[in-house]
Amino acid sequence: MGGAMDLVASAENIIVAMQHVNKAGESKLLKTCSLPITGLRCVKKIVTELAVLEVVPEGGFKLLERAPGISVEQIKAATEGKLIIEGEIPEMEL
């Protein structure tokens, strides 16, 4: 039976789709992972209901796009981990 470990071991470009915050409104994009780690440094991008982010090698999340109607300030407030913002962040096209 294959599992998450098998998936991350053979994939080159892993994109994670997840909720940006938990039910209590707390960020799920953390400074450090508190859960068991299946594969180290294998996720390249994260897509949430608020934004598209690139996971950068030096640690942190580079903001690439924001969801329609969502401001950069809202994304900052919902992100515990290091958030890298360079220039004007475009809104996602749906």
Image (spheres, grey):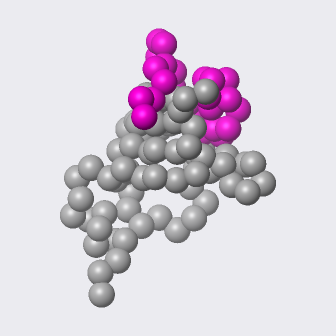
Whether residue 58 is visible here, answered yes or no, is no
Residue at point 42%, 29% (across, down)? 93
* Front-lying residue, 37 or 21: 21
Residue 61: x and y in percent read 49, 35
Whether residue 18 is visible here, answered yes or no, is yes
Q: Which residue is most to the front?
A: 94
Residue 82: x and y in percent read 57, 33
* Front-lying residue, 26 or 17: 17
Looking at the image, residue 12 lies above or below residue 54: below
Magenta region's main secondary structure? loop
Q: Is residue 65 highlighted in magenta?
A: no
* Residue 83 in which image quadrant: top right
Q: Is residue 86 highlighted in magenta?
A: yes
* Residue 72 in which image quadrant: top right
Magenta stretch bounds: 70-94
Looking at the image, residue 33 lies above or below residue 68: below
* Residue 38 in which image quadrant: bottom left
Residue at point 48%, 24% (across, down)? 91
Residue 20: x and y in percent read 60, 46
The quarter of the image holding the C terminus is top left
Residue at point 38%, 62% (across, down)? 39
